[in-house]
Image (spheres, rainbow, N blue to C red):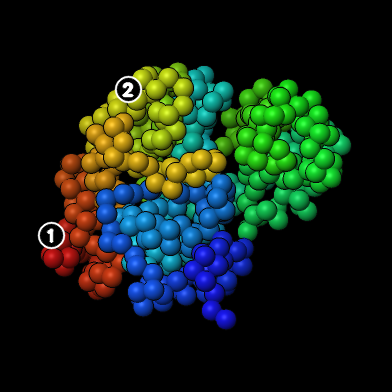
Amino acid sequence: MTSSIPDLEAQLNDFDPQKRKQALQSLAVLAEQKEIILPPCGDEINLHCHTFFSFNTYGYSPSAIAWLSRKRGLVIAATIDFDNMDGAAEYLEAAALLGLRACTGIETRVFVPEYETKVINSPGEPGVAYHIGIGFTPGKLPAAAIESLARLRAMAGKRNLGLLAKVNAFLSPVVLDYEKEVLPLTPSGNATERHICIAYAKKAAAYFNNDMEALGIFWSGKLGEDASKLDLPHGAKLQGKIRAKTMKKGGVGYVQPERDAFPLLRDANSFILASGALPVHCWLDGQSDGERELEQLLTVSRDAGTAAFSVIPDSAYTAGDRTLKIKNLYSAVALADALGLPVMAGTEMNTAGQKFVDDFQSPELQPLHHIFLKSAFILYGHATLSRLLGMGYGSAWAAAHFTETGKKNDFFRSVGEKLSPEQEKLLANLDSSATPANILQRLG
């Protein structure tokens, strides 16, 4: 019996990679046979899609992200997973099958010594900053980069175990076994705080046999919140409150990170650049001490090798003081653009309610859309030339051919606009002796 389209789409999120691959291939055949009509690419982008290899609130795999992006008509989409690249190869393979412009990267946290007394973009944690690398080529990482990724995974696991011990003591008799009850929620053992929250919510529901009254008494007592506001037994509001009350700043499980708990910004950038990827500064909402002096902060970050800028538009302006947040968003994007930093935009999808793609026609985002779109083409051009030829944005080849950031941006934007997955063969047999003009000529 042939599986239905909804069944195949659900199978895209199975933890078994072979089942995901088979489902995607079946959907691609249906699209080729016009049983599924895929739209032409428009002008929507999402360059910050977490997959279930870190945490996606909808459970999307890399293959699902590729399929849904192509089904929606996105012109470019990128996956960014936390502290790992376990799904990168799958995503690029899926995107190539579907003819989707794609790139992939990682997000991590770094320490910025120059800001050790000021909060940057990790609330309550002076000197600590969320940071991105985009444009990696899985399977071609240098040994030092592989070692760096292994250290990031080990650091994250160590933090999780320390946190779990404290939260278990607080939530007893609802306690978790990390190996048996948390790690199985992930396809490759890369658990996050959000996985732990889901595990606690489900463990409590099981412990109290889904008795809503008893469950409500337990959670309201532990979290200090009216049970009617927690969407029991294990909804997103409950998970968010568990995380806020037990794992974030001021929570019983929170441990203020020491300086050596994260790699230094400069060291992280070195491994990103050595991998042919591009370091990206992450901006939150302009309200921290560090982000209030954004130009100075970006000077520090650029001096350490950072060459692009990231925003998460929707959450940056929809929560809190909208007027202030929109003003801050516009100012941050304008500054980054003026400095020649490509501005990547995306929704993350690691929190319930986040959109698959931002509403770029909204009154708030429409004025910024052209910057996000041109930047997406720059980053896709960089990622593809890095993967195919080792000649990405931060490469020695690019440094030899471009002394002006504006001209470099124009070139990589042109590559991103002209190039599609089906046309990659046009760049065959080129090497580092090729000039930018040679490459553009090949692409027509």
Q: What residue type is disc 1 on?
A: Ala
**Which residue is denoted by mark 2 in the rendering?**
327
Circle 1 Cα neighbour tier, 10 Å, few/some/many (<14 / 14–19 / ≥20): few
Is residue 184 at all visible to an observer of this figure?
A: yes
Horizontally, residue 115 falls left or right of residue 44, namely right
Residue at point 64% right, 54% down? Answer: 186
Residue at point 33% right, 57% down? Answer: 73
Q: Residue at the right extreme?
A: 173
State which tag comes first along the sequence, 2 or 1. Answer: 2
Q: What element carries label 1?
A: helix
Q: Is mark 2 on a helix, strand or loop?
A: helix
Q: Say which of 20 and 136 sits in front.
A: 20
Circle 2 Cα neighbour tier, 10 Å, few/some/many (<14 / 14–19 / ≥20): some
Q: Where is residue 222 in the image (x, y as percent from the top left)?
A: 77, 27
In the depicted structure, whether residue 313 falls above or below residue 114: below
Residue at point 52% right, 38% down? Answer: 109
Q: Say which of 101 and 57 sits in front.
A: 57
Quadrant of the rendered structure where residue 18 is? bottom right
Is residue 300 at all visible to an observer of this figure?
A: no
Q: Position of residue 425 (x, y in %)?
A: 26, 73
